[in-house]
Image (cartoon, helix red, strand yellow):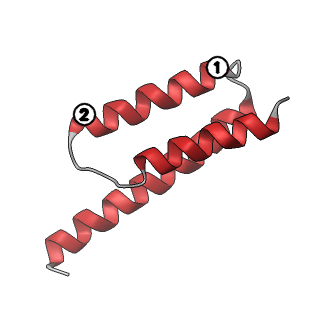
Amino acid sequence: MDYWNIYKDVWNFHKKYADVKEDDAYWEAVVNESNQIAKQYGECKFVINLLLAVIDELERIYKEMKNNADTGI
């Protein structure tokens, strides 16, 4: 398994989408690119788990943004 390139690709994915947006196009791009990376590495469990961890973090940030917007913080 090519751990170096897996980490590199997932890190680049995370950097690319770290500035979380509220629009559908952003989330579609997140899903499409994560699927592309997973397929690139044969959809191995390790890659999928890394991608899911990043997506969970993006969702956490999004929910925090929404919550702060709702409370005026």
Quarter in which the N terminus is drawn = top right
The numbered disc on residue 56 is none
**Given the current orientation, which residue lies at the most extreme right position?**
1
Q: Residues within 10 Å of mark 2 (few under 14, many from 20)?
A: few
Among numbered discs 2 and 1, the one appearing first in the sequence: 2
Please tell me whether mark 1 sits on a helix, a strand or a loop. Answer: helix
Amino acid carrying mark 2 in the image: Ala
> Where is residue 62 shown, x and y percent of the image?
33, 57
Residue 25: assigned label = 2
How far is mark 2 from mark 1, CA to CA? Answer: 22 Å
What number is the disc on residue 40? Answer: 1
Specify whether 49 is left or right of 22: right
Residue in the image at 58% along x and 40% along y? 51
Give the left or right position of residue 14, taking residue 39 as reference. left
Q: In the rendered structure, which amino acid carries the disc numbered 1?
A: Gln
| Residue 32 at x, y percent in the picture | 42, 25
Tell me: residue 70, above or below residue 63.
Answer: below
Name the residue located 32 percent from the left edge and 38 percent from the top edge.
27
Q: Position of residue 69 (x, y in %)?
A: 17, 70
> Residue 50: which quarter of the image?
top right
Q: Residue furthest bottom?
A: 73
> Horizontal and vertical percent for residue 73?
20, 81
Q: Do the numbered discs 2 and 1 sit on residues whose CB atoms are within 8 Å?
A: no
Q: Which residue appears at 60% of the width and 47% of the height?
A: 11
Seen in the picture, residue 41 relative to 52 is either above or below; the reply is: above
Q: How many marks?
A: 2
